Image (cartoon, helix red, strand yellow):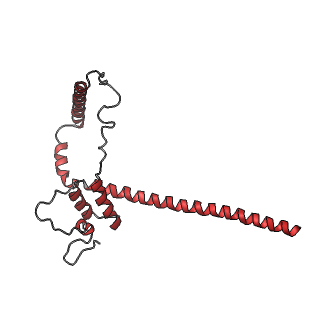
Amino acid sequence: MASTLADGRPAFSIDRILGLELERVGNRPKLHRPWTDIGAEKASRGKGSCSQQHQKQQQQQQQHQQQQQQQQHQQHPHHPPQQMNSPRPTSNWYIGRRPRTAFTNSQVDVLETVFRVNCYPGIQLREQLAGRLDLDEDRIQIWFQNRRAKLRRSLRETRLRRVQTAVADLGVGGRVKAERYQGAEKEEDR
């Protein structure tokens, strides 16, 4: 159940967490909701078969590679051009993979601030963050998942170091006690 204030606003809003409780009236950013575009996807699927679309994608990729090679040759005319039939694509190492999101320092600062308050933000908070930081909501969700994993890993490593220190202390203390015991036995034998 989401926490709300007396006036109905969510308790975990970005403005509230960052201490910037300024109401933005008017132009709100479009929220990233891919599930609302399902009808458009179905309409585009009906136009042509998969093999035609695949051929079109391959042609576009080849044209893109040719354009890149031409640009590269114009910039560096003394370097030999890369092979067209190379097993690895020149522009993207894996065609189906989305590019990695590069977060700015200010985006990371805001995300870290929110994480300190709430490490499991709901959809509304993630959408507010998405609008404010100009990121997709799913990227923010993944960022929080990765940050929680990083926290768990650091806690696990801290516990491991404590155990190693305790074991090392016991080992040293155990040797010292054993030496004292052996020393006491020698004195008794005299």
In depth, the one of 22 and 87 nearer the eye is 22
Query: Height in image: 125 above or below 95?
Result: below
Q: Residue at x 71, y 64 (%)?
A: 176
**Extreme bottom residue here?**
6
Query: Height in image: 34 above or below 1?
Result: above
Query: Height in image: 20 above or below 77?
Result: below
Which quadrant holds the N terminus? bottom left
**Extreme right residue here?**
190
Whole-percent x, y for residue 112 in the image: 33, 60
Whole-percent x, y for residue 130 in the image: 23, 57
Relative side of 26 to 17, left or right? left
Q: Residue at x 12, y 65 (%)?
A: 25
Relative side of 175 to 143, left or right? right
Whole-percent x, y for residue 80 in the image: 30, 21
Whole-percent x, y for residue 182 in the image: 80, 64
Question: Which quadrant of the structure image shows residue 15?
Answer: bottom left
In depth, the one of 188 and 80 nearer the eye is 188
Q: Residue at x 25, y 35 (%)?
A: 54
How many circles with numbers are drawn on the protein? 0
Which quadrant holds the C terminus? bottom right
Query: Height in image: 134 above or below 115?
Result: above
